[in-house]
Amino acid sequence: LWVGTGEANVSQDSYAGTGVYRSADDGASFQRVGDDPGTSGGNPLVSHTVFRLTFDPNGDAFAATDNGLFRYSASSAHWTEVLDPAETVDNPPYDQQVTDVAVVPGSGGSSVIAAIGWHGPGNTQNNGFYQSTDGGRTFTEVKPTGDINAADIGRTSFAYSADGSRLYAIVQ
């Protein structure tokens, strides 16, 4: 059982998260995932809000947060930021809120899609859909097709058909 922390609604009294936690005993106890013993337990997800957690078939995890997308490598047990268009300084704020992430079914974990969305005013320069074809290590922006207005992408939720041939997106 994995749990992301933080309040996913943005307001002056929202609570920041303390990271992602995992239970190996059906929820009786939890340990934070990805602490770095070399930096006194430092963890890049502390003080972030986790909007969504998803996993690839290889055991790696993705955390969509209020300040970028992070990838957890099961082999190294560390989080790495893989999508942050505004880079490390999120100023103006809210311009890289990754509101959802999904691994494409049937891709073996090689295809991943993420959404950055904030309904202003302002700070929408990075809004859009981003796709990875290398297992979520790098991302490029892609333009949506169908009835989605690419100029008006806000907080988005994804769902794939079971075979991965169709992507559904709810854009708020």
Image (spheres, rainbow, N blue to C red):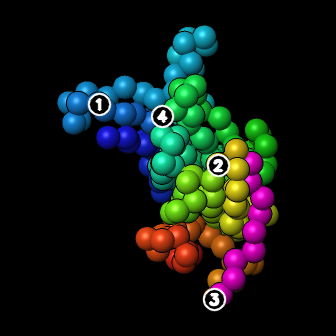
The kind of residue on which mark 4 rests is Gly
Q: Nearer the viewer, mark 4 or mark 3?
A: 3
Q: Nearer the viewer, mark 3 or mark 1?
A: 1
The residue closer to the viewer here, 148 or 58, is: 58
Distance, label 4 to label 3, CA atoms, is 35 Å
Q: Provide residue 41's location: percent of width, then percent of height.
A: 53, 16
Q: Nearer the viewer, mark 4 or mark 1?
A: 1
- Residue at 62% x, 57% y is 112
Instruction: Decide: few, some or many residues near mark 3? Use Cα within 10 Å; few <14, some 14-19, many ≥20.
Output: few
Q: Which residue is mark 1?
A: 24
- Residue at 57% x, 67% y is 155
Distance, label 2 to label 4, CA atoms, is 22 Å
Q: Earlier in the sequence, mark 4 or mark 3?
A: 4
Please tell me the numbered disc located at residue 147: 3
Distance, label 1 to label 2, CA atoms, is 25 Å
Please tell me the numbered disc located at residue 135: 2
Q: Earlier in the sequence, mark 4 or mark 1?
A: 4
Q: Provide residue 165's location: percent of width, then percent of height.
A: 55, 75
Q: Determine the main secondary structure of the stretch shown in magenta.
A: loop
* Quadrant placement of the N terminus: top left
The kind of residue on which mark 1 rests is Ala
Distance, label 4 to label 1, CA atoms, is 17 Å
Instruction: Decide: few, some or many residues near mark 2? Use Cα within 10 Å; few <14, some 14-19, many ≥20.
Output: some
- Residue at 23% x, 35% y is 27
Please tell me the numbered disc located at residue 19: 4
Range drawn in magenta: 138-146
Report whether 112 appears left or right of 34: right
Residue 43: which quarter of the image?
top right
Q: Provide residue 105's location: percent of width, then percent of height.
A: 51, 63
